[in-house]
Amino acid sequence: MKTKEEKLRAVTEDIRSKLPRLKELEKGCLLKYNDDFIEICKKMPKTSKFNDNFYQGFSHDDICGHWFYENQIEDLGYEIIGKEPMLNDVLEWFNKKEFKTELTGQGLLYAVIGKDHPMKKAISCRVDLSKPYLHQQSEELITFLYELL
């Protein structure tokens, strides 16, 4: 049986693959360099007509800052991971999967699975609306989403 973290990782990867805007280089985007994760904190304007935009990021252990140019990210060995999905991204992901969904004001997420999905039924799960990021949500919701992959 998979852990919550493994299920979350799988769901997050699927959401990022369906929503390319989550991998755009801007504040909040995660990069991976070797085994260190770096989060972009600033996008700086072009310094001259010859330079691309450059970014400042900090590693998750906050030991050091990193500066890099947009056109050098992959050449320097950085891997673009993307931004952390939020609940609005989850709803957009549902639409990309062609599920009919509704999130009520009381925090109940309903999904009607299409005719091609093996579950072929309406299902629901509780969502904590006070926690906007997917990784902050309950194991129940993560499992719910994982089963829809």
Image (spheres, rainbow, N blue to C red):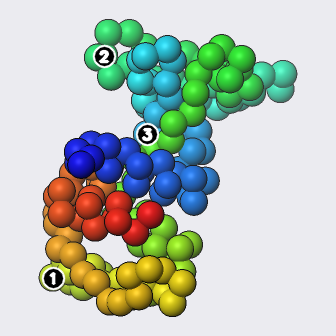
Residue 18 versus residue 104 in the image, above or below: above
Element class at badge 3: loop
Q: CA distance from mark 1 to mark 2?
A: 37 Å
What residue does disc 2 label? 62
Which residue occupies the foreground of this view, 148 or 93?
148
Outermost right residue: 50
Instruction: Inspect the image, locate mark 3, and give the three-letter code of the amino acid beneath it.
Output: Gly
Instruction: Inspect the image, locate mark 2, and give the three-letter code of the amino acid beneath it.
Output: Asp
Q: CA distance from mark 3 to mark 1?
A: 28 Å
Element class at badge 1: loop
Instruction: Give the mark nearest the N terminus, 1 or 2.
Output: 2
Residue 50 versus residue 85 in the image, above or below: above
Q: Quadrant of residue 120?
A: bottom left
At 16% from the left edge and 58% from the top edge, which residue is drawn?
138
For disc 3, the neighbor class at 10 Å (few under 14, some 14 to 19, many from 20) is: some
Element class at badge 2: loop
Residue 21 in view in this figure: no
Q: CA distance from mark 3 to mark 2?
A: 15 Å
**Tag shown at residue 28:** 3
At 65% from the left edge and 23% from the top edge, which residue is drawn?
73
**Residue 57 placement, left or right of 96:** left
**Which percent across, then down, holds residue 125?**
21, 76
Instruction: Nearest to the eye among marks 3 and 1: give it.
Output: 1
**Tag shown at residue 88:** none
**Which percent across, then down, holds residue 17?**
57, 53
Q: Quadrant of the C terminus?
A: bottom left
What residue does disc 1 label? 106
